[in-house]
Amino acid sequence: MDSTPPASHDHDAEREAQRLAALHSLELIGAAPEQAFDGLVALAARMLDCPIALLNLVDRDRLWVAAGTIAGPREISRDVAMCDRTIRGKGPLVIDDLAQDAVYRDSPLVVDAGYRFYAGTPLHLCDDAGVRQPIGTLCVIDSVCHRVSQAALDALAHLATLAEALLEGRRTALRAVDVAKEGERLLRDLARKDRIFRHVERIASIGSWHLSLADGRIHWSDNTYALHGLPLGQQPARDHTFDFYPPQDREEVRRTLQRTLNDGAPFDIENDFVTARGHRRRVRSMGEAEIVDGRVTGVIGVFQDVTVRHELETRLRRLASTDALTGLANRAAFDAALERAMAAAHGRDGVTLMLVLIDLDGFKAINDTLGHDAGDEVLRMTGTALTQSWLKGSLAARIGGDEFALIVDDPALLADPEALRLKIDEALRITVGSGGLTMISGGSVGIAAFDADDRSPRDFVRRTDTNLYTAKRGRVGRRPASLGSRRAA
């Protein structure tokens, strides 16, 4: 009789134990949601156009939802979760239609919750031996089927990398706090503690500090000086330590510390920071009160440079709102900007807002005749045309394959819609060529002024689209993309 050797089973059990140890080092199972993770799943939902995005941690027998875009139970059984299968693989798991999947079609998540689409990618964290362990997933879910693009999967992978950095940063900060506490308890072994702690601080870009209320003095670790851009021993007076923060952050930091001194509440904040050498950084500060006999006697704090992570988050947010080819705002950013502009225009007299919709004429002919490189060049040149200085800060967006939009609020442009239309029409006449053949692209332009009866951006867009349709009908019979000379063979 053939059976699995006991050694294989022992190996699997050991590997699972190592995975769980890495997971539990985060101390996230059962913890309250964190703002950084909430922002990340919201970004994932937007970038992959799904209503549900989750950051899940896979425990021994359950799946814990560390962050999600919808309210609901924060744990489910591991044996019915798609994420269990995801962490067992080496890459993303995409199921276009869960109802047709042999493994999950009878799952309560499909039958009862109505899930139809799932895309997830594993999240890894190194264990104590430096081995990357799959501890959870970043996934998106929808109640309708999807055909996910490679670009969307790449975006999910980038977000997963950011999630792993956030998780590692959390663990590093937790360990640093533990090291700080241990350091205070091991004053008799100060030399050894200082050696270990300096290494931890340097590697993790962390500094620590201790405020004693007995004498009002603040003790900085060596790396805290380095993070401030100051030589060792050149510590500013207590009140001047806030001067490293810009004015808009300074009062928040001051109030946070005072609240801890008053009631012993721990803190975890993130702020902009300027070193003594003028370098702009992003820092995270964590701390907690020292309490003796029910009275606050001091504060232990940890100070971490998180500039790289913050810049990565900012860059990803920018990518989520920008069309990669043209550099214009994408559809999601356009929708949000139009909603804001309409809210600002409500109740104001006169024409204070106009929407322009543009449909490129003959774009398909250019793609078919000259190739997609020429088509891409038309899109890029259209983006350039719609961001010229004469448009005076109007928000330009690419809202479809060959569809563009402008949100106009400049009084000079609002005063003469026909002149605006003619000038846009002229700017959209773009000449491209390839292989000795040139073609001229044009565009149809529809304009509508904001009306108080527009209850939603959809109403405003629908009215403008009607004007665009009228403009396109007026161009029937005109050649939208004219041919130039062909080079002799």
Image (cartoon, rainbow, N blue to C red):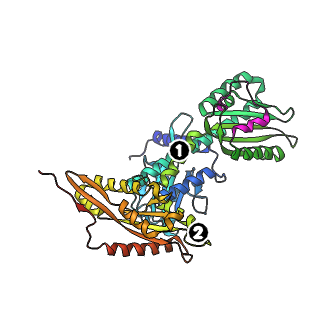
Residue under label 1, please give it.
312
Q: Quadrant of residue 471?
A: bottom left
Q: Is residue 319 above or below residue 50?
A: above
User: What span is in magenta?
Assistant: 226-245
**Does the magenta-highlighted stretch encompass residue 393?**
no
The percent position of residue 90, horizontal first and vertical second, equals 43, 46
Q: Residue furthest top?
A: 191
Say what amino acid the circle numbered 2 marks: Ala
Q: Residue furthest bottom?
A: 453
Q: Is residue 479 above or below residue 258?
A: below
Dot 1 surroundings within 10 Å: few (below 14), some, or many (20 or more)? some
Query: At 55% across and 38% down in the image, what residue appears?
Result: 127
Q: Quadrant of residue 235?
A: top right
How far, Cα to Cα, is label 1 from label 2?
34 Å
Label 1, secondary structure: give it.
Answer: helix
Q: Is residue 44 visible?
A: yes
Residue under label 2, please give it.
345
Q: Nearer the viewer, residue 183 or 23?
A: 183
Q: Is residue 459 above or below residue 45?
A: below
The percent position of residue 200, horizontal first and vertical second, equals 63, 30
Whether label 1 touches label 2, CB < 8 Å: no
| Horizontal side of residue 208 vs 121, given as left or right | right
Q: How many marks?
A: 2
